[in-house]
Image (cartoon, grey):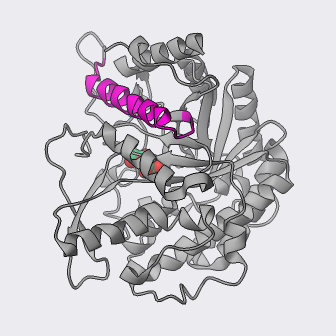
């Protein structure tokens, strides 16, 4: 299937790739950067496969110009990256570290010189460690500190950056970071982690206001969504699936778009709601946004798990190809998901940007050096068509950001999962574009020529 055979997308549609600071930057001590919770977490034995850390990443802090050149070669119209809070405020509070902001200013200028729209995310999980020491997202103060940081970033960059993303996947922060303890900061609080959901949302709302006050024109939040499929029609499995759907797909979206939390009864919370929610918070959280970022990788299939605080468990989804992570490849799940968002939120749904979508594969160069990642090409082809199907069905999707430019630090999996369009030899940092790089480049070129 050639990239040129994809149907044309609307004029002005953004074609991009996405990355995040801790996964690519390395240089964790350069220019006054402070310590993040991921630096700390990676040092703890047994947290990351084979003891890998993000201390190297893909070397992008020192060699960002190489990334920008590769983005230009790819022909993207937009680049989603994240700003490392500990570079801007090493302690998570107080005045800006100018050298840290200088880096993102240079990157921004480099992108704009190549005609690439910068789309920064303010929080892709790298909380300054001093804030975690004071309670992290379990405390309300972190939301307030986040807004201060947002103001510093916008104060320096909003003259050149129009579209901003506040948080990346707050669900993962709450679930993996504070409930299960498999991501930083490694807390296994189960349902006692729920205040981190509210405080992140409050942080989003306060940052939305701060960004606009400092000149940002457009603000959105990025969530990861997964259609929740019940393993059977039994009432117990259906209830478990509904509970999961609330947790992953609604708790971080209803408050933003509807100004209210979904029913949290499956988690033992009555109509009075979570005690950490204060008067006025939901008005702050539900201030208008200009888009919703959707990260999609695969659906989730669920069955009931009796006598457990989390009343569900994940089940395999047989019958589909799988990625190196073991995730099923289900492009139609993305059309289903976008349709679900359209149905659920109706006129309250702002324009949608697919802010992440991609797959890991065991990519190694052949004898001639070529890397034929056909599974990734098939994955991207199927999912981009699925986005087109959703647009045809009436969902206003404005952009697609492939995850990711180059193989990077994949959190608990270290460097073992390769998601890049560009292969990285993690010993030498040498980079080789894979077949999918050329495929995506051709797709973008064809779409830009048509648009
Ligand atoms: C995250 C990325 C991550 C990707 C693949 C998303 O949940 O935002 O940081 O690398 O999924 O696991």
Q: Magenta region, mostly helix, strand or loop?
A: helix
Estimate the x, y position of residue 398 in percent, counting from the top left: 59, 35
Q: Is residue 217 visible?
A: yes
Estimate the x, y position of residue 87 in percent, counting from the top left: 68, 52
Give the tally of numbered discs. Answer: 0
Residue 365 occupies which quadrant of the picture?
Answer: top left
Q: Residue at 28% x, 77% y: name it.
A: 311
Front-lying residue, 165 or 86: 165
Q: Is residue 97 visible?
A: no
From the viewer's perspective, is 297 left or right of 393? left
Q: Is residue 22 above or below residue 344?
A: above
Q: Which residues are magenta?
A: 371-399
> Is residue 395 located in the magenta-colored stretch of the structure?
yes
Which corner quadrant holds the C terminus? top right
Which corner quadrant holds the N terminus? top left
Q: Residue at 54% x, 44% y: name it.
A: 20
Estimate the x, y position of residue 358 in percent, counting from the top left: 39, 36
Q: Residue at 23% x, 68% y: name it.
A: 313
Front-lying residue, 282 or 57: 282
Residue 382 occupies which quadrant of the picture?
Answer: top left
Q: Residue at 76% x, 29% y: name it.
A: 109
From the viewer's perspective, is 364 left or right of 170? left
> Is residue 49 located in the magenta-colored stretch of the structure?
no
Front-lying residue, 156 or 376: 376
Q: Is residue 58 above or below residue 232?
A: above
Residue 129 occupies which quadrant of the picture?
Answer: bottom right
């Amino acid at each position: 299937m050639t990239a040129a055979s994809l149907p044309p997308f609307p004029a002005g549609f953004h074609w991009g790739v996405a990355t995040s600071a801790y996964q690519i930057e390395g240089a964790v001590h350069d220019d006054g950067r402070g310590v993040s919770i991921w630096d700390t977490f990676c040092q703890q034995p047994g947290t990351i496969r084979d003891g890998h850390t993000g201390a190297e990443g893909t070397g992008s802090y020192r060699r960002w110009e190489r990334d920008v050149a590769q983005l230009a070669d790819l022909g993207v119209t937009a680049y989603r990256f994240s700003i490392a809070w500990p570079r801007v405020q090493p302690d998570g509070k107080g005045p800006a570290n100018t050298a840290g902001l200088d880096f993102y200013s240079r990157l921004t200028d480099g992108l704009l010189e190549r005609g690439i729209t910068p789309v920064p995310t303010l929080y892709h999980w790298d909380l300054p460690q001093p804030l975690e020491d004071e309670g992290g997202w379990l405390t309300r103060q972190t939301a307030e500190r986040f807004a201060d940081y947002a103001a510093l970033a916008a104060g320096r960059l909003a003259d050149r950056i129009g579209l901003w993303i506040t948080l990346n996947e707050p669900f993962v922060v709450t679930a993996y970071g504070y409930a299960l303890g498999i991501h930083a900061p490694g807390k296994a609080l189960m349902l006692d982690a729920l205040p981190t959901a509210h405080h992140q949302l409050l942080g989003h709302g306060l940052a939305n206001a701060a960004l606009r006050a400092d000149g940002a024109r457009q603000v959105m939040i990025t969530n990861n969504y997964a259609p929740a499929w019940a393993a059977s029609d039994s009432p117990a499995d259906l209830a478990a699936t509904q509970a999961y759907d609330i947790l992953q797909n609604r708790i971080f979206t209803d408050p933003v778009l509807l100004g209210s939390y979904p029913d949290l009864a499956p988690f033992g919370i009555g109509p009075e709601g979570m005690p950490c929610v204060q008067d006025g918070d939901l008005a702050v959280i539900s201030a208008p946004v200009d888009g919703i970022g959707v990260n999609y990788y695969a659906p989730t299939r669920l069955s009931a798990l009796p006598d457990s605080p989390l009343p569900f468990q994940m089940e395999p989804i047989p019958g589909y190809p799988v990625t190196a992570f073991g995730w099923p490849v289900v492009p139609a799940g993305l059309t289903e998901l976008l349709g679900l968002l359209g149905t659920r939120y109706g006129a309250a749904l702002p324009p949608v940007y697919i802010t992440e979508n991609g797959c890991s594969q065991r990519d190694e160069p052949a004898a001639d050096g070529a890397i034929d990642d056909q599974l990734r090409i098939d994955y991207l082809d199927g999912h981009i068509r699925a986005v087109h199907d959703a647009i045809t069905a009436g969902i206003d999707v404005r952009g697609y950001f492939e995850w990711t430019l180059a193989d990077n630090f994949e959190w608990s999996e270290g460097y073992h999962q390769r998601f890049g369009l560009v292969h990285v030899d993690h010993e030498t940092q040498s980079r080789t574009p894979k077949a999918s790089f050329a495929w995506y480049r051709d797709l973008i070129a064809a779409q830009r020529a048509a648009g």
